[in-house]
Amino acid sequence: MAHVLWSEIMNFSASNPRWFNRDRFVLSNGHACALLYSMLHLTGYEMSIEDLKNFRQLNSVTAGHPENVLHPAIEVSTGPLGQGISNAVGMAAASKHVAARFNKAGFDVMDNFIYCICGDGCLQEGVSGESSSLAGHLGLGNLIVLYDDNKITIDGSTELSFTEDVLKRYEAYGWHTICVADGDADTVGIAAAIKAAKAVTDKPTMIKVSTTIGFGAGAKAGTAGVHGSPLNGDELAALKTQLGFSPEESFVVPEDVVEHYKIASGRGEAARQAWEQLLVKYQTEFPTEGAELARRIAGKLPENWHSCLPDFKGGKKDATRSSSGKVLNALAEAIPEIMGGSADLTPSNKTLLKVSGDFQKDAYANRYMRFGVREHGMAAIANGMAAYGGVIPYVATFLNFVGYSAGATRVGALSHLRTIYVATHDSIGLGEDGPTHQPVEMVTMLRAMPNCKVLRPADGTECNAAYITALESNCPSIICLSRQNLPQLEGSSVEGACKGAYVVWRSPEAADGKPAAIVIATGSEVEIAIAGAQATGLATWVVSAPCLDNFNEAPLEYRETVLPQGVPVVSVEASSTHGWARFSHVQVGLHTFGLSAPIEDVYKTLGITAEVVADRVKGLVEQFPSGSAPMLVAHYPDAVSGMGPKAAAH
């Protein structure tokens, strides 16, 4: 399959791996990564024999599963099964959109295909079903998946657990299906199947290729014994002999193989050069579109895009989900590559784009995507869109159901993919919906994820800052938004919120000096924190901390202006208290699931109230008077990378 794709089918450029109109290749069954690395070496990419010898070694580009950040020709990080094929769906959707937006008569500046090899495991994972269902609905005819049907998993034969008719399932999804009976040797049949798939422009294609795992490996061929373990010396020597190699040689590429792939690489280079010439003509004929396409390919945001952000100061109380919708729509006007949608929660998430209709098979130029009730597939598709380039994807659901998408969210974080999550209904503020929908642990879980920004704005101004952070980050951003109405805070600041935490309110007694205590809070609890601080009658500050990730990364000097050493700190968040000991001495939060009741009753019963905050502040000041509170982890220079030297004892 790989030999046919690189030799006869794909347009690629080893000299310019990020050429935008290249065909994309995704190895969804990423445990087979040695195949991908070998193909990159054979076709002239910067992947040396030494790199192949260093397979799975420290600091090698040939990691144990493909990682997109290690080599520019690796399109996406794969390994968690089902993610890669779902990324491929996102790539195909992004390609369709960019083509519909920029192609003109006689100028098909975007006409690439997305190729994916997957295995049984990918098709057993539920995420692939979610994504494939949507791909069929959207008629993504530029997506071709080759299914390596070798009938073996780690446990043994697929007869143990996976006996469905995959092609019938994919036909039901709305895919075109083809079967190649001899994937071990029938390169002509594989090539013919791919060419037939390319001719079907209104459906994605699934090509089932029947193969023998460990083909040529003697008694181990066709068994689970060759799935995850290398052959021993004698077995490997026998295999080499059978395939016409010297059993004494390793890491040797015959000259005729080198020449064969040079021809294929040369064809790809010619295709790239022809495209670059077409692009120059396009930019001359259509200068406005040409400039925008060039900007998108470069990954640059439009100039002065900040100026579009709405002004919320002095406005009425509003849910931050509603403020988010206003910000998102303003940004979509100014940044036309913003594209995304919701998991069947559009009215609740407030994510509908007024500037665009629905992205459908007859309207690929539109930008609003109806993902259906498919949170995991939605996130994995968005990762593929972000990896493809030319678009900035956003997705939306209730914060609690980001748990459904967490597998894809994690891969996006380690892959440095900019996907924006609009996560509404973010706390016990859901009230009557009860504990099944109240995400008491989700913020903590997501904050623990490296390279993932978690943002919980307290009002519309902080919503502006949340989107600025998301758009200027090279990672997923989870914007957690309230269902209930919140005040537009007089002291809220875009600049302060972008730093992660800042002093949003000072009591009259602390207006010009160091406070006796600080209350730090996020989102809907900032209002409660201010009310609690006011009730103490003490010299207090309230710190709004919409993004602890950004605050962790801020210089120590800045962190100490927000949380001065020696000042007792109480944190308030209607969520798990895990992690808050880095920033506070006493935590007001949750240690249980939520409740189904009116919002006021839920907050009161669970102890997230101004009265509780005031009581905790007074008690803490009594315990640590005159700036004698212990140092916090946030006070240490290495707070972002690890805990301070006394943190464990503290």
Image (spheres, rainbow, N blue to C red):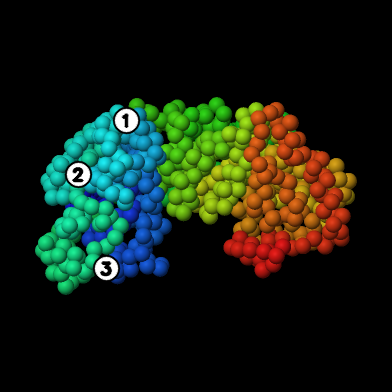
Give the quarter of the figure containing the C terminus. Answer: bottom right
Helix, strand or loop at label 1? It is: helix
**Looking at the image, is mark 1 or mark 2 nearer the viewer?**
2
Q: Residue at x 56, y 38 (%)?
A: 400
Q: Residues within 10 Å of mark 1 (few under 14, many from 20)?
A: many
Q: Which residue is mark 2?
A: 210
Seen in the image, is 243 located left or right of residue 381?
A: left
Residue 191 location (% of width, % of height): 16, 44
- The image quadrant of residue 553 is bottom right
Seen in the image, is 464 located left or right of residue 265?
A: right
Helix, strand or loop at label 3? It is: helix
CA gap, disc 1 and disc 3 = 42 Å
Q: Amino acid at mark 3?
A: Ile
Q: Is residue 323 above or below residue 515?
A: above
Q: Residue at x 17, y 44 (%)?
A: 190
Q: Nearer the viewer, residue 417 or 179?
A: 179
Q: Amino acid at mark 2?
A: Ser
CA gap, disc 2 and disc 3 = 30 Å
Q: Residues within 10 Å of mark 2 (few under 14, many from 20)?
A: some
Q: Nearer the viewer, residue 251 or 468?
A: 251
Q: Which residue is mark 1?
A: 173
Residue 166 location (% of width, % of height): 27, 36
Q: Amino acid at mark 1?
A: Tyr
Q: Is residue 109 above or below residue 646?
A: above
CA gap, disc 1 and disc 2 = 21 Å
Q: Which residue is mark 3?
A: 49
Residue 563 location (% of width, % of height): 74, 57
Residue 360 location (% of width, % of height): 38, 28
Does residue 170 show up?
A: yes
In this view, which residue lies farthest toward the front?
Answer: 160
Pointer 1 or 2: first along the chain: 1
In this view, which residue lies farthest toward the bottom?
Answer: 248
